Amino acid sequence: MMRRFCFTLDLKNDPALIAEYKKHHEKVWPEIAETYRQCGIESMELYLLDTRMFMIMEVSERFTFEAKAHADRTNPRLQEWEHLMERFQQVPAGCHDGEKWKRMERIFTLQNA
């Protein structure tokens, strides 16, 4: 059974940086995508409105936030990617140390009856 998580983050309010950030995401490094898949992330989408980022992440039953955090800490290529992305990102208020993307709370869903 797939689970879905949504996150938000802000980019720095600089059109040149935002354009560069978008360019990086046109060709995400293959090792990054593979690491995400190995963690149980089945699909991931990013949306942008002005400086506000929105991520939808669908994961398999084997996904855990702990395993993803471990991969983030121990994979040098993933750390390199995250360090590169920090140049563009502005951490939302209320994030803990090391946290960039803030998990969102679902407050409504419309489903077919």
Image (tube, rainbow, N blue to C red):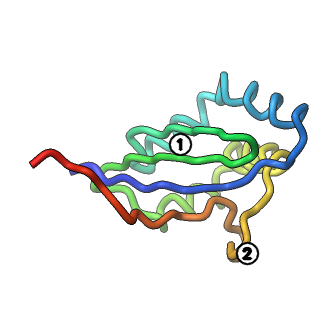
Q: Which quadrant of the view contains residue 112? A: top left
Is disc 2 placed on a helix, strand or loop? loop
Q: Which quadrant of the view contains residue 31? A: top right
Residue depicted at 75% across the width and 45% down the height: 51
Q: Real-space Cα distance between discs 2 and 1?
A: 22 Å
Residue depicted at 38% across the width and 46% down the height: 58
Task: Residue lying at the far left in this picture: please name it.
Answer: 113
Q: Which quadrant of the view contains residue 77? A: top right
Residue wearing tag 2 = 97
The three-letter amino acid code for the residue at tag 1 is: Thr
Q: Position of residue 113 (x, y in %)?
A: 9, 49
Q: Nearer the viewer, residue 1 or 34?
A: 1
Q: How crowded is mark 1: few (under 14 residues within 10 Å), some or many (20 or more)?
A: some
Left or right side of 12 for 108: left
Q: Position of residue 12 (x, y in %)?
A: 85, 49
Q: Which of 80 and 97 is in front in this view?
A: 97
Question: Disc 2 or 1, which lies upstream in sequence?
Answer: 1
Q: Where is residue 109 in the image (x, y as percent from the top left)?
A: 30, 55
Q: Which of 112 and 69 is in front in this view?
A: 112
In this picture, is 103 found above or below 28? below
Residue wearing tag 1 = 35
In this picture, is 97 found above or below 4? below
Q: Which of 30 and 12 is in front in this view?
A: 12
The three-letter amino acid code for the residue at tag 2 is: Asp
Whether residues under marks 2 and 1 lie with C-beta atoms below 8 angstroms apart, the answer is no
In this picture, is 104 found above or below 11? below
